[in-house]
Image (spheres, rainbow, N blue to C red):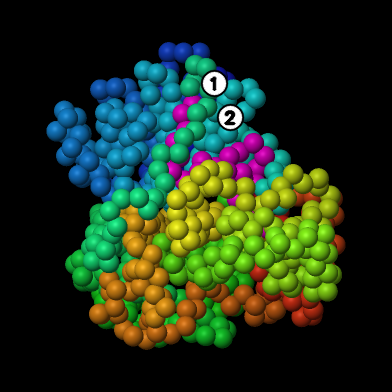
Amino acid sequence: MCGIAGIIGTREDVTRERLQSLASSLAHRGPDDEGVEMLTSGGAHAVGFVHRRLAIIDLTPAGHQPMRDPETGNWITFNGEIYNYRELRKSLAACGATFRTGSDTEVILKAYAQYGRSCVNHLDGMFACAIWDAATERLLLAVDRIGVKPLYWRHDAAGRFAFASEARSFLASGLATRRIDHAAVMSYLALGSVQAPRTILAGVSQLLPAHTLVFDARTGAVSIERYWSPSQRGVPSSPAEIASVLASAVARHLVSDVPVGLFLSGGVDSSALAVLAHHVGAGETIESFTVTFPEAPYAEGAYARLVGERYCRRHHELVIRDADLAAALPAALAAQDQPSIDGTNVYVISQAVRAAGMKVILSGQGGDEVFGGYPTFRRLPRMVAAHRFVTATPWSVRRGLAWGARAWAGAAPVTAKVAAYLTSSGDAMACYAIARQLFHPDVCRQLLSGVRSEADHAWSSATGVAEELAGLDAARTVSLLELRGYLANTLLRDSDVMSMAHGLEVRVPYLDRALVESVFRAPASAFSDATLPKPLLLRAVQAELPREIYERKKMGFTFPWESWLRGRLRPQIEELLQAFPEDNALGINVSACRQLWSQFWSGRGGVTWARPWALHALMSWVQHQGMI
């Protein structure tokens, strides 16, 4: 994986110095090579592409980017991996395409020459890419179907267009002003991360998963289209078919010219990957990595060790103490591209894995979203069904009950969600936002009392999601909401930026296109089973997976934040709270933040660790960007 960026504008806009500043801002993403190109343009505008390379496929200089197609004059800068590039290369060669390198990058260029904008339909993998069409003077931006690889863009009033792998690059290069998008801050407070297509920076947008964008440099027009959505239509898939597709997905994700490792938590998802990797022939080469916490009330190290020692060549256990986290925390917060409640765990683990010599690692991310592992798969359908009784109650009564619940229980998370539920529309998207709610909308408005908010509905990434939900059953509705919501806006975004801070590529086999499509076509009776968690996944590996792994209670992988915030991290948090000015770019009410921290520390009001931590991460991000 890599870092990419580019600018289209006047010759005064597109200077080598500015392109170099973009490259420097992305240096951590690609320590192996750098490419800065001023592309030839016969028009009144200039074009510049930037690339920082982490060499995984075709380690030779032939894989250098930005890359030009000598036959068409088109250019590409590409971040990611195309897992079907060998098959696609053969089909393109049969159509007359010729190749000079062994890279997947060149395959994308040739696919674009053959298929144009629809070339993305032929790509299986995780990717964010930009292609400059020399003949039409149009720029194509594309992001993979699930949004594993992020891509940000800005089209300003002067007509200048820019894109980059990280939002911070727009600040580093002077391509965006240091203005906060307060609607994005509202969405962050509501859900723990900024909801795409917004970003924390005013005027900078994120290209949504499964979307392409075309910028016409001649007219200045921008066109955005969705090119894929999972569907239940088609021949129903069987458990045997899904097991076969899953094994193929793991095999594809193991293709690399450098060693591949595995994040192993001891849970079902990552343990299943270890079993499958072993069976497709990687057991003699793959190394597993797990993290243990002496301060944690539970330990998964023994479960991870059980699987790692059985199915992997070598198993590593990384012990992280509160002192280790305290030492790493400033750098981890500084590495965040946008504020997030999550990601610190990925930063710390990735640092250790990269130090062990790995450049590529498999992750079990997506297993819960695709196979139905989250509690939302049970709760959300019940919330939607029960809301008909709520709507039968007069609005004035519902509003009064919600107000009473909030007044009685204050900041208690469950009560806040009940209050929001009573006054919601009760559809799947509204119930999902409540299920994933961090702060109640009223609390969000109190925390941003200095700002007139336009974002009462935090689920701003709902752009197009309602249309995607049409025709899906209850389970697949939740699956899509999780894929487009928490996974895309928190887990994948944080995983990308925090792993790439150390030049580590994270691959996610459970988000393979063919696998997602196959699971979506499975009958409802096969998707759910009262006796087994994630039955479609377990049936593929159950015969060889130790019973201890899938019969125990699901724990989830998280740091012991509660004890850390009350212990070693307390001085850092209180120092920032005291130093943060009341008059700030966020428009955040610092007094209210201090009060919430006091409630957490004293145990009053049911304030859980996630809320003060979310505020600390937000304020730290602003401080690191020099935007206070």
Disc 1 target residue = 220
Residue in the image at 62% along x and 47% along y: 460
Q: Amino acid at mark 2?
A: His
* Res. 257 visible in picture: yes
Q: Nearer the viewer, residue 554 or 394?
A: 394
Q: Nearer the viewer, residue 139 or 120?
A: 120
What residue range appears in magenta? 187-215
Residue in the image at 60% along x and 56% along y: 427
Q: Amino acid at mark 1?
A: Gly
Disc 2 target residue = 155
* Res. 36 visible in picture: no
Q: Is residue 431 above or below residue 229?
A: below
Res 433 quadrant in image: bottom right
> In the image, residue 75 lies at what x, y percent?
36, 29
> In the image, residue 531 lies at what x, y percent?
39, 81
Residue 205 lies in the magenta stretch: yes
> In the image, residue 374 lies at what x, y percent?
49, 69
Label 2 or label 1, whichever comes before in sequence order: 2
